Amino acid sequence: MRILKLIYALAAETLYSIVTFDDSKDTRCKLNDFKDFAKNTGKTLHILTKPLDLEGIILKDKPQMCIVSGWYWILQERILKKVPKGFIGIHPSLLPKYKGGAPLVWPIINGDKASGVSLFYLEKGMDGGDLIAQKSFNISEEDTIQEVMEKAAYLAIELLNENYPLLLEERAPRIQQEHSLSTYYPMRRPEDGRIKWNNSNIEIYNAIRAQTHPYPGAFCFTEDGRKLYIWKAKLFSQPCDNVAGLVLQISDGFALVSCGKGGICLYEVQFESATQEIASKVLKSGMRLI
C-alpha cells in the first residue's frame, strides 16, 4: 500500500489501474485498504482470484509499465512481453541472494546480520532480471520479522522514489545479476514453524523471532498434545545442559527451557484457541515441550 501511495503522490496521472489478489483469509489482509484507496482516488481496482486472470487485465488496460510488489506468482513470458516498458519488481533481498519465497524470514532464521531491497526488471524465471538499484539494512540480534519488514518497506519507498522518474523516462540503469551467486528459498508454510528442541538455543531463537507477529508463529506441543505458540523469547546467557524441551525454571515473567545446546527464556506464549499470555503464568517447571 505504501508503494501505491508513493506512485500516486509522485505522478498520479501515471497510475491507471491497480491489481491485487483476494487475501481476505490472511491475517495480514490489506484488501480493504486497496478498496478504500481505489474509491478515494477514482482508480480502477482489479481483484484476482487466480493468477491467469492477470493476462486479460493486461490486454484490456494496455499498461506501458507495471510496478510489482508483494506478488507471489511467476509471470509468464508472454505476459511480460505485452508491457512495453516492462514489469518492475521490488524484492526484499539483495539479489541474487534469497530469490523466491519468504525473503525476509529466511535471513533471520539463518542468523544473517544484514539484508536489503532490490529494484529490478522482471524477466522469465524467478527474480533473475537486471537490477536497477539496491539498498541494504542491518539485522540486529533483537530484530523480529516486524522490525525487518519495516526496514525493508522504508528502503523500498526510497528506491522507488529515487528511480520512478528514471523508469518513466526509460533512463533507469540495467545491471546484470551475478547469477553464479544465486540462492533460492521456498515459501514458508505455517507447519514449517515447528520448533525442533534438539537444535541450539540460537537456532530456536532465530526461528521464533523470524515467525512472530504478524506471521503465524513458531510453535511446539506439550506432552499432552496441546499446541503452544511462542511469540517472544530471549537467549539464556548461562550454560544449560539438560533434556531438550524441558522447562527448567519459572521466573518472574519468563520460563527457562533447555535446548539441544544452551537454554532459551520464553516470555510470551499462547495455547491454541486461547489468549496470548506471559509464559510464567501458563507453563510449569518440569513440563516437557516437544
Image: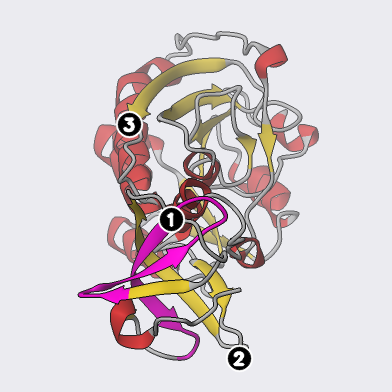
Left-right relation of 208 to 98: left
Task: Give amino acid for label 3.
Answer: Leu
Q: In whole angstroms, how far apart are the C-alphas of marks 2 and 1?
A: 25 Å
Q: In whole angstroms, how far apart are the C-alphas of marks 3 and 1?
A: 40 Å
Of residue 251 and residue 226, the one placed in the foreground of this image is 251
Whole-percent x and y of residue 105?
51, 47
Residue where numbered disc 2 is placed = 224
Q: In whole angstroms, how far apart are the C-alphas of marks 2 and 3?
A: 45 Å
Is 267 one of the magenta-colored residues? Answer: yes
Q: Earlier in the sequence, mark 2 or mark 3?
A: 3
Q: Residues within 10 Å of mark 1 (few under 14, many from 20)?
A: some
Whole-percent x and y of residue 194?
61, 65
Residues drawn in magenta: 250-273
Of residue 139 and residue 30, the one placed in the foreground of this image is 139
Q: Earlier in the sequence, mark 3 or mark 1?
A: 3
Q: Residues within 10 Å of mark 2 (few under 14, many from 20)?
A: few
Q: As displayed, is residue 245 above or below residue 210?
A: below
Residue in the picture at 57% in, 64% down = 244
Residues at discs 2 and 1 in contact (Cβ within 8 Å)? no
Residue where numbered disc 3 is placed = 155
The structure's colour scheme is: secondary structure
Residue where numbered disc 1 is placed = 240
